[in-house]
Image (cartoon, rainbow, N blue to C red):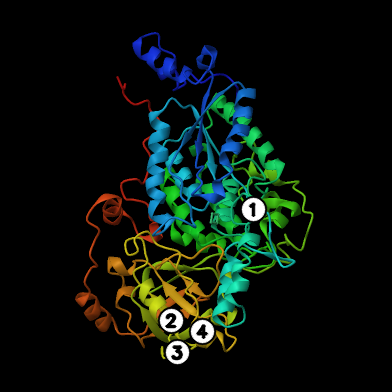
Amino acid sequence: MDSEKPPFRRSQAWFGRQDRDGFVHRSWIKNQGYPHDLLDGRPIIGICNTWSELTPCNGHFRELAEFVKRGVYEAGGFPLEFPVMSLGETQLRPTAMLFRNLASMDVEESIRGNPIDGVVLLMGCDKTTPSLMMGAASCDLPTIGLSGGPMLNGKFRGKDVGSGTGVWQMSEMVRAGEMTMAEFSSCESDMHRSSGTCMTMGTASTMASMVEALGMALPENAAIPAADTRRKRLAQLTGRRIVEMVKQDIKMSQIMTRQAFENAIRTNAAIGGSTNAVIHLLAIAGRIGVDLKLEDFDKLGSEVNNILNLQPSGKYLMEDFCYAGGLPAVMREILPMLHGDALTVNGKTIRENVANAPCYNRDVIKTVDDPFMPAAGIAVVRGNLAPNGAVIKPSAASKHLLQHRGPAVVFESIEEFHAKIDDPDLDIDENSVMVLKNCGPRGYPGMAEVGNMPLPPKVLKKGITDMVRISDARMSGTAYGTTVLHTSPEAAAGGPLAVVQNGDMIELNVPERKLHLEISDEELARRLALWKSPEKPKRGWYKLYVETVQQAHLGADLDFLVGGSGAAVPRDSH
Ligand code: FES
C-alpha cells in the first residue's frame, strides 16, 4: 500500500471550505487554542473515550488519551477526543448489557456526524469494548482499538485473588459457613488495587483479546496491565499508527473479515475466554456484514485446546499472562489453526505479528500438545428446551455434570431465586437442575449476568460446589460452573424455557450437544398455548429495546441496527 493521500478526506468537508460554514467549523474549534495549520488537511483522529468515574475500570482513560494524542501529533495528525456513553459493569443497573446497543448508537452517530477521518477506540470494562466496536463498524472508517489494560493481580493475605472469581468463591464460603462476613469484606481493598479492568480472563480481558485476535489492535494489547508504562507506550504507538492507516485508507471492513472472526473464535477457545464473547462477536460481525452463526463457535472452537492457565478456569491472572508473553504467545502456539494471512491494523499479517512471539512461562501459557484443558471451547447445545441453541463453557464446568439428568427446580425470576434459595425446606439436592427464567434480552430486560446461580447452602454444606444450572441469562466471564446460558428463544419471548415446571426431568448431554425437556410434544404444545407474555415497558429506551432486540443466538443487537450506514458526510448543519 502506498502512503499517498486518498482522493478524499472527509474532515475537509468541514474544515477545507472557504465559505461561511468553513469559518464556523474552524473558528469554534480554534476556541480551544489550536493553531490554524492543524486544520490544513491533515488526518483528523477522533479519540472515542469511555472515561467515567462510574466506570472505574476505565477511570484512567483521560491520561491514556493523552498518550494517544502524542502519537497522533508525532505522525502529523490532529487528535480530537470525544466522550461516549460509558458502561460500568459493577455499577450500572439493571445490567450494563441493556445499554450496549444504546452506547453503540452513540458511538456510530458521534463518528459519522463529526469531522473525523480515523478513530481510536478507548475500551476497557466489559460492554465498552463491544459497544465501541459495533458502533465504529457501522461507520467503517480506519479504526484501531486500544484497551485500557487489566488491573495488577489482587493480593489478599499473601495470596493472589482474582476479580469476580474471588468474590464468587469467597461468597460461597460465607454461605457455607467457612468464612465470616468480616473476613470477606476485608478483601475489598486488596482485590482491586490499581487502575484497569478485571484481571481474570473475564469478559473485559476476553474482549480485549478478541480485539487483538481480530487484528483490530496492535500486538500485546490484551494483557499489558493498565499500571504498566508499556500501556502508555502502546497508546502512543496506536496514535502514530492510526494516522498512517488514514493515509493508507485501511478500513475496519478490510481487517474484520470472516477469516478474522474465525481467528477470534479459535483464540477465544485457546484462552478459555468468556461465553460473552459469543454474543458480542455475533453482534460485531452483524454490523460489519460478516455472516457469523452460533454454530461457528462450536464448529471452529470447541475442539481447540485451552492452553492458558488463567482464572476462572485456572490459576494465574492477567499480569502473569503479560509477563509470560501475552496473547501473541498464545496465537503463535495455535498459528497452524489460524488464518495467518489475515491483515491487522499495523499493516502486517497475523503470522508476521506472532510467528516469533516468545513464551517466558510454560506454566501460564501451555502448548497445544500439553494443554491446560483439552477441547475446551464453547459448546452449543440444542433440543426442545433450546430450539435456537444455548451455550455452555465446558472448561468452566464440572466434568461429571456434562452428562446429567435431573428434576427441575424452577425460579420464575432472579428475585424469586434469591427469596427461596437459602430456605432449608426448598426441595432441592445436588442432582436437581436449577432453572431460571425471564433473564434474557427481553425478559430482564438486557440479559443480566445471573446465570451462575449460587448453590443452596444445604448442598454447599455437603462439600458440593457445582450443579447443573439452565437459564436465558448470561454469566460473568469471571464465573464458573456447569451453567447452560443464552437459551434461545428466551422465556419472555415464549421459548420452551417459559413452561418448564418443578419436577420435570431435564437431560443435559454436552458431548451429544443435547438439552432435552422430558415431556411429550403434545404436553409442550399445550403448555405453550397457555403461556402469557409478560407486560412490556411502556416508554423510553426500555420500550425501544424490548420491542426490537434480537434473541441471543443472533447477538442481541437491535434488529434495525444490524449492518452499517458507512461514513458519508451528512448534509450541512447550517
Ligand atoms: Fe469492569 Fe470487570 S467490572 S472489567
185 and 498: which is toward the camera: 185
Tag 3 or tag 4, which sits nearer the N-term? Answer: 3
User: x%, y% of residue 564?
Assistant: 38, 39
N-term-proximal mark, 2 vs 1: 1
Q: For numbered disc 4, what is the local secondary structure?
A: helix
Horizontally, is 92 left or right of 64 in the view? left
Query: Distance from label 3 to label 1 (Cα)?
Result: 39 Å
Circles 3 and 1 in contact, beta carbons < 8 Å: no
* CB atoms of marks 4 and 3 within 8 Å: yes
Q: Position of residue 302 (x, y in %)?
A: 56, 65
CA separation in Å, label 2 and label 1:
33 Å
Residue 424 marker: 3
Q: Secondary structure at mark 1?
A: loop
How far apart marks 3 and 2 lie (CA) works out to 8 Å
Q: Residues within 10 Å of mark 3 (few under 14, many from 20)?
A: few
Badge 1 residue CB within 8 Å of ligand 1: no
Q: Which residue is mark 4?
A: 457
- The residue drawn where x is 60% and y is 22% is 3
Q: Nearer the viewer, residue 316 or 87?
A: 87
Q: Is residue 207 above or below residue 520?
A: above
Task: Indicate which disc residue 306 carries.
Answer: none
Q: Amino acid at mark 3?
A: Pro
Q: Are marks 3 and 2 in contact (CB under 8 Å)?
A: no
Going by the numbered disc 4, the residue's amino acid type is: Pro
| Residue matched to label 1 | 151
Which residue is at 40% across, 79% downward? 516
Which residue type does callout 1 highlight?
Answer: Met
Can you identify the residue that label 2 sits on? 421
